[in-house]
Image (cartoon, coloured by chain):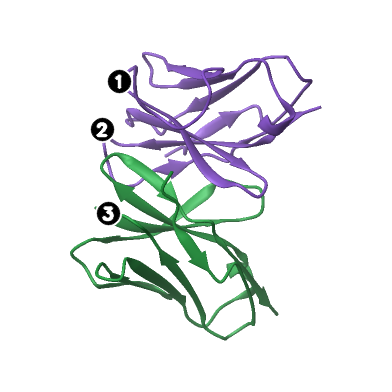
Amino acid sequence: SQQGEEDPQALSIQEGENATMNCSYKTSINNLQWYRQNSGRGLVHLILIRSNEREKHSGRLRVTLDTSKKSSSLLITASRAADTASYFCVMTSGSRLTFGEGTQLTVNP
Amino acid sequence: EAGVTQSPTHLIKTRGQQATLRCSPISGHTSVYWYQQALGLGLQFLLWYDEGEERNRGNFPPRFSGRQFPNYSSELNVNALELEDSALYLCASSARLGADTQYFGPGTRLTVL
């Protein structure tokens, strides 16, 4: 099945630093979303970017999408310890969502 | 507004048994999705129901089945449990057929011994 690839798999930074996570996919998409998951819990929707958009902002989050390279990035600025979680990119193609492998972000206080 | 709810929170079964997991979508949502998140395998799409009908199915054997009730709540049944079925099972709902954003429940942790 189509899976997105995310890198890095794990990222450890200090509070206040920026965190960048990347996602690549294989086939055309309608939109791409980023979700966050705290350990063993459900997923929380963060932001959606449509295939005709290149950049989107929401608070401390900035998402870019490059459909020619089939890639997206999520930037979290001024990170906080509470941002520690797994982050997943999710590709929508038709009616199905396909998840990336996830990036485990650890923000050290 | 209440979010997606799932029950039970944890479920422990032995090999060969059957497990039933339940999900209640956000009020007004008609689509319910099931996902399996097994250790080391990431999130895998299982099933999608809308208006009581199965709309799509992931690459899982037939012993994974489910249904959606008239009130849009849903059950996921796993028959003949195997050890590798141990995982977090997540349910999500969306507002309409093919809506972009899915809202996830907290999950049911299934452990097969």
Q: CA distance from mark 2 to mark 1?
A: 9 Å
Identify the image quadrant of residue B14: top right
Q: Which residue is mark 1?
A: B51
The crowding category of the residue bearing disc 1, from other C-alpha atoms within 10 Å (few below 14, some 14 to 19, many at least 20), is: some
Drawn side of residue B89 relative to residue A67, left or right: right
Q: Are marks 3 and 1 on the same chain?
A: no
- The chain under label 3 reads A
Looking at the figure, which quarter contains the C terminus of chain B? top right
Q: CA distance from mark 2 to mark 3?
A: 17 Å
A67 or B92: which is nearer to us?
A67
Q: Amino acid at mark 3?
A: Ile
Q: Which hue belongs to chain B? A: purple
Identify the image quadrant of residue A4: bottom left
Looking at the picture, does residue A76 appear above or below residue B97?
A: below
Q: Which hue belongs to chain A? A: green
Q: CA distance from mark 3 to mark 1?
A: 25 Å
- The chain under label 1 reads B
Residue B66 drawn at (x, y percent):
48, 18
Q: Which residue is mark 3?
A: A29
In terms of sequence position, does the residue under pointer 2 or pointer 1 come before the other?
A: 1
A83 or A63: which is nearer to us?
A63
Q: Which residue is mark 2?
A: B97
Secondary structure state at the residue bearing disc 3: loop
Residue B35 drawn at (x, y percent):
51, 37
Residue B70 drawn at (x, y percent):
36, 13
The crowding category of the residue bearing disc 2, from other C-alpha atoms within 10 Å (few below 14, some 14 to 19, many at least 20), is: some
Residue A11 drawn at (x, y percent):
62, 74
Identify the image quadrant of residue B57: top left
Q: Are marks 2 and 1 in contact (CB under 8 Å)?
A: yes
Looking at the picture, does residue B87 appear above or below residue A79?
A: above
